[in-house]
Image (cartoon, rainbow, N blue to C red):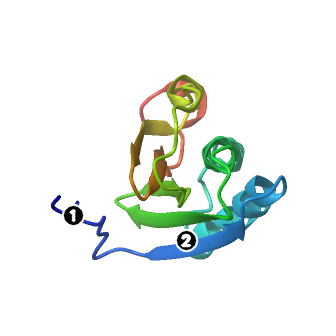
Amino acid sequence: MPRRPRMQIRNRQTTVLTFRADQWAAAKAAQQALTTVRGWGYPELDADDLDAAVNLLVNTVVKDGGKRVSVHLADQDQKILVLVLGHVPDPGPNENILGSLGALRTVDSCGTDAAEDGRRVWALLDAEPRRLGGTAA
């Protein structure tokens, strides 16, 4: 069976945060993700949306029962990618989190897939400063 190509992210700021897959992983990941993104120069990113997205993503892969969770962050063009890997071979079906992720105000897109090397769930958040009052400048 041919190997699936591994994900590659190039030409942008990236970081990987790794956590033990336990009940505290999501809160730790959300706090460290916000610190990382603020350090990249995104002071206007909606912290509540980032917190909610990271919590949903991490809690989803923790339920797969693995030992660790990795959170991959990347930025480009005022967007922040949050990708979470569960590292559990052939994970079973999971709850559908896409509706919850898509309901967050700054989530532009999101997705999930499961492969033999583990579940991948992700969200792309808009870090562009929001206009007050919803009117164009």
Q: Residue 54's spot in the image, x, y percent?
A: 64, 50
As measured in the structure, the alpha-carbon distance from the residue carrying label 1 to the one carrying label 2 is 37 Å
Callout 2 secondary element: loop
In this picture, is 89 found above or below 57? below
- Judge whether 133 appears above or below 79 on screen: above
Q: Nearer the viewer, residue 13 or 95?
A: 95
Task: Pick whichever of labels 1 and 2 is earlier in the sequence.
Answer: 1
The crowd level at tag 1 (other Cα within 10 Å; few <14, some 14-19, many 20+) is: few
Mark 2 residue crowding within 10 angstroms, few (<14) / some (14–19) / many (20+): few
Q: Residue at x 35, y 74 (%)?
A: 12
> What percent of the width, then of the height, locates residue 121?
48, 46
Q: Is residue 79 left or right of residue 21?
A: left
Mark 1: secondary structure: loop
Label 1 or label 2, whichever lies nearer to me, is 1
| Camera-side residue of 21 and 104 | 21
The residue depicted at 60 percent of the width and 45 percent of the height is 57
Q: Quadrant of the N terminus?
A: bottom left
Q: Residue at x 63, y 68 (%)?
A: 38
Residue highlighted by disc 2: 41
Relative image position of residue 56 (x, y in whole percent) = 65, 40
Mark identifier at residue 44? none
Using the image, determine if residue 128 lies above or below residue 133.
below
Of all residues, the one furthest to the front in this rendering is 1
Residue 35 visible in image: no
Q: Furthest residue to the right? A: 24
Query: Which amino acid type corresponds to the residue marked 1 in the rendered image?
Result: Arg
Q: Nearer the viewer, residue 85 or 46?
A: 85
What residue sits right under mark 1 in the picture?
Answer: 3
- Amino acid under disc 2: Gly
Specify whether residue 86 is in view. yes
Q: Residue furthest left?
A: 2
